[in-house]
């Protein structure tokens, strides 16, 4: 059997967050919960301890170290594989998937790769530009407006700017703020979003997990889920625990509950609870939180609630018209960086190969348009609701149906399930 691992970056193992070289960019889940192997929960901790006997379960390592771990794991997996299994690393971009012939074919810029099964694992889907009117192309061409905060080279260039605007106030904004804030005479930074909320900070200790009580089977309503959370919060208060213990415990059931919840309830939670949930759930490592708050306290960084009406060119700078709670404001910046987070409409933002498959009806957007219709075992569903024997989906594209589908905790289980199913079927 041949496995073609196709990635346009040419870096196999770590995905985008773990390719950073900035040591202050930390994992946001403690070491003891970051094993990449579903059947070996201490694998990352053991790997760390083999290199540094003082490594602690509760430490938040640099993401570049985690990237090394993933790179090594892939190499080891390839080396240990049975002789009949071959791993091909292909550095290229998949433009489309052709299902019109006897076998699926991946269309690359100058050749096609025929396979028996396609696993789509293209990562988080970024949202569109956060403005009602298009950002002028000239701003993008001159790198004065960066549509992606992952354009690390251009973000690095912004360290010599005077005033930078970051749109979005999640963990990606935190990464950018730390990069820009590392330079003593670096820019003043304004970060804005519609909520103005930004991630909370982890405690130094590990959270204490207890199982929330939701119905064992059948549908789960939003009331039952919120009730289980409220119960955990009161128990935490009585026991002298922390709200973080309650939030992290919810992760044990949110995926299962989400799948059993009526779509109206899921939509309500998404519209009314999602942002406060995210800032409490996806937290900064303690050292990152300390640096981030130092930037705020020293006046280098301001985080506020604002919408963006328009982004225009003003000479060599960028003019931004803001919508604030109490009126409008206009300010000029040397650079604007978008760190807006995940897409809210997969039909508009899906990556190229997924876009084509949706249009042809081979894949179907989920009810909330956050990603795709996918069965629990990773098999995709088409627009007629039929299960696909040819395509599986892994990661963020399952957010609409699985909810928790972005972190290593879920990805390792999803990939294990898909791999076992494929081994049985092929
Ligand atoms: C700032 C940040 C910090 C995070 N920290 C953590 C953490 O500490 N712990 C945790 O559990 N999770 C964390 N996450 C979540 C993180 O997204 C996942 O852990 C993980 O990286 C997702 O893996 P993935 O393989 O699904 O996607 P990615 O890591 O995004 O990988 C997708 C890959 O697909 C390739 N690709 C995409 N489209 C194509 C195409 N058409 N052709 C060829 N190749 C293509 C890309 O080059 C990329 O390599 C973090 C996320 C962010 C944004």
Image (cartoon, rainbow, N blue to C red):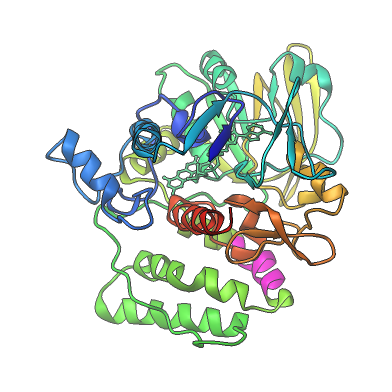
The residue that appears at 54% across and 37% down in the rendered structure is: 2
SS assignment for the magenta stretch, majority? helix
Q: Position of residue 89 (x, y in %)?
A: 53, 27
Residue extending farthest to the left is 53
* Position of 115 relative to 248 (above/below): above
The one of 77 and 384 positioned closer to us in this rendering: 77
The residue that appears at 42% across and 79% down in the rendered structure is: 212
Q: Quadrant of residue 339?
A: top right
Q: Position of residue 245 (x, y in %)?
A: 34, 67
> How many badges with numbers are in the image?
0
Q: Quadrant of residue 75?
A: top left
The residue that appears at 36% across and 36% down in the rendered structure is: 291
User: On the picture, is 72 further left or further right than 137?
Assistant: left
- Does residue 107 show up magenta in the picture? no
Q: What range is drawn magenta here? A: 266-274
User: On the picture, is 169 further left or further right than 95?
Assistant: left
Is residue 324 in view from this perspective? yes
The one of 52 and 165 positioned closer to us in this rendering: 52
Q: Quadrant of residue 318?
A: top right
Q: Name the quarter showing ligand 1.
A: top right
User: On the picture, is 375 further left or further right than 111?
Assistant: left
Q: Position of residue 389 (x, y in %)?
A: 69, 57
- Does residue 273 show up magenta in the picture? yes
Q: Position of residue 363 (x, y in %)?
A: 78, 54
The one of 425 and 288 positioned closer to us in this rendering: 425
Is residue 371 in view from this perspective? no
């Amino acid at each position: 059997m041949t496995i073609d691992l196709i990635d346009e970056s040419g870096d196999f193992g770590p995905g985008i967050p773990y390719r950073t070289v900035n040591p202050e960019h930390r994992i946001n889940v403690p070491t003891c919960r970051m094993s990449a192997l579903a059947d070996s929960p201490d694998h990352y901790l053991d790997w760390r301890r083999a290199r540094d006997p003082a490594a602690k379960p509760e430490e938040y390592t640099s993401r570049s170290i985690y990237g090394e771990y993933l790179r090594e794991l892939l190499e080891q997996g390839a080396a240990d594989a049975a002789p009949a299994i071959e791993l091909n690393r292909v550095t290229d971009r998949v433009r489309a998937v052709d299902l019109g012939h006897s076998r699926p074919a991946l269309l690359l810029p100058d050749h096609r790769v025929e396979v028996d099964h396609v696993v789509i694992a293209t990562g988080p889907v970024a949202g569109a530009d956060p403005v009602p009117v298009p950002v002028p192309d000239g701003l993008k061409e001159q790198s004065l407006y960066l549509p992606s905060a992952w354009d690390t080279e251009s973000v690095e260039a912004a360290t010599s700017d005077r005033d930078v605007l970051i749109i979005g106030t999640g963990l990606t904004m935190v990464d950018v703020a730390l990069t820009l804030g590392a330079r003593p005479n670096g820019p003043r930074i304004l970060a804005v979003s519609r909520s103005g909320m930004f991630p909370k900070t982890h405690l130094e200790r590990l959270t204490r997990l207890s199982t929330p009580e939701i119905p064992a089977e059948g549908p789960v309503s939003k009331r039952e889920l919120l009730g289980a959370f409220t119960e955990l919060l009161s128990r935490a208060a009585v026991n002298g625990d922390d709200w973080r213990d309650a939030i992290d415990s919810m992760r044990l059931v949110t995926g299962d509950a989400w799948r059993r919840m009526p779509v109206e309830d899921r939509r309500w939670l998404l519209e009314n609870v999602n942002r406060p949930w995210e800032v409490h759930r996806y937290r900064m490592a303690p050292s990152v939180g300390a640096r981030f708050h130092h930037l705020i306290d020293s006046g280098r960084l301001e985080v506020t609630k604002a919408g963006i009406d328009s982004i225009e060119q003003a000479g060599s700078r960028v003019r931004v018209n803001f919508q604030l709670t109490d009126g409008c404001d206009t300010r000029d910046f040397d650079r604007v960086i978008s760190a807006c987070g995940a897409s809210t409409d997969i039909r508009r933002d899906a990556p190229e190969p997924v876009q084509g498959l949706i249009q042809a009806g081979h894949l179907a957007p989920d009810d909330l348009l956050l990603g795709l219709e996918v069965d629990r075992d990773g098999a995709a569903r088409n627009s007629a609701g039929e299960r696909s024997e040819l395509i599986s989906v892994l990661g963020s594209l399952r957010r609409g149906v699985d909810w928790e589908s972005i972190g290593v905790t879920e990805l390792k289980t999803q990939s294990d399930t898909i791999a076992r199913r494929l081994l049985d079927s092929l």
